[in-house]
Amino acid sequence: MAAARPRGLRAFFGRKPVLFFAGLLAALLPVGVYVGMQTAPHVPAAEDIEKVVAKTLEQRGVAAPAAKAYDKIRPSVVRVRAYASAAPPQHQAKSDKPGKGKGGGADKAGDGKTEPDAVKDEAQSIGSGVVIVDSGIILTNLHVVAGSKRLKVIFHDGMEASATLIGARPEHDLAVLQAGAIPDDLVAATMAPASELALGQPVMAVGFPFDIGPSVTTGVVSGLNREFRAADDREPLTRLIQFDAAANPGSSGGPLVTMEGDVVGIVTGILNPTDQGFFVGIAFAVPIESAAGAAGLSPF
């Protein structure tokens, strides 16, 4: 009878299982040595992370270019208000009507006296302006102040002052104002040649649209040497900068600024094919060369 064949593990390993396990151990030994030589990953300390972040922020800067430009121009931007009256309205006497008091008398005390009622000093026109000389000389649009009998400017710190129209250039819709008083820390804007602007160059408009602000909008130079005629049939304005940063009523007279914070123009109008006076993507500014010329200044 033939001998039975070995089965199971003994059949797999053969008659010398010790040799098999020795070979397996020899094969796994280098793997174990390699794993043992690996060090645990380095976990940086919190202070190391802070140093790296600080260095990166220092190199790249945190603020966007528009934010830096606004910080530079902000102290020079003013709100301009024009009034139809030569002097602020005085308090008016508020008459008491019978039957309005608790006892049916003329007033609560029953002495028939009247109480003063403040009259709101409404501006007929509201716009923006920019200080170009730190003695309080301000550029704005002529259409903002035209026909007014009294002017007021409000500076970046909230200080209010009367202003006088000292110059005008109707062909460029420009007016020059002199503030009656100024803040101690008033800063004049810096200017840059509009002649060096390029299509597609980023710009921003700063002002008080709808008397809200200061407001900042950004866009690009859309065109140069444009012509624009306002709805009131004034003579067309020429050699204008076209841009697409949002501008609305109240933005007029504010500065058009580069991302370096330099003024290149004075916002003067918006084009809307309807009779609605709000922004639809096309606005214009007078080049600063013309604007500074209205004040008899060389901008550079």
Image (tube, rainbow, N blue to C red):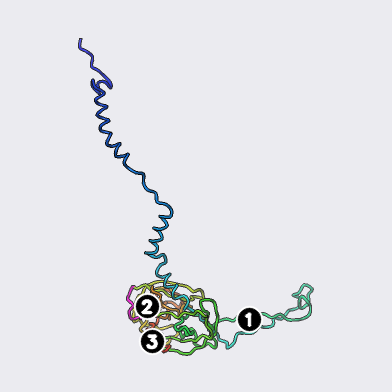
> Tag 3: residue type?
Ser
2 or 104, which is in the foreground? 2
Q: State the residue lying farthest toward the top.
A: 1
96 or 116, nearer to the observer: 116
- The disc label shown at residue 298, or none: 3
In the rendered image, the vertical position of residue 161 relative to residue 102, given as above or below:
below
SS assignment for the magenta stretch, majority: loop
The image quadrant of residue 273 is bottom left
Q: For residue 292, which quarter of the picture? A: bottom left
Query: Where does the N terminus fall, quadrant-wise?
Result: top left
Q: Nearer the viewer, residue 87 or 5?
A: 5
Residue 247 image point, x, y percent: 44, 75
Mark 3 or mark 1: which comes first in sequence?
1
Left or right of 240, for residue 138: right
User: Amino acid under label 1?
Assistant: Val
Q: CA distance from mark 3 to mark 2?
A: 23 Å
Q: Which residue is mark 1?
A: 119
Q: Secondary structure at mark 1?
A: loop
Cα–Cα span, label 3 and label 1: 43 Å
Q: What residue does disc 2 label?
A: 242
Crowd tier of the residue under label 2, counting other residues whose Cα lies within 10 Å: few below 14, some 14–19, many 20 or above = many
Pick the front one: 289 or 273: 289
The residue tagged with tag 2: helix, strand or loop? Answer: strand
Mark 3 or mark 2, earlier in chain: 2
Magenta run includes residue 96: no
The image position of residue 67, as x and y in percent, is 43, 69
Distance of label 2 from label 1 (alpha carbons): 41 Å
Which of discs 3 and 2 lies nearer the camera? The answer is 3
In the rendered image, the vertical position of residue 140 relative to residue 8, given as above or below: below
Magenta range: 191-200
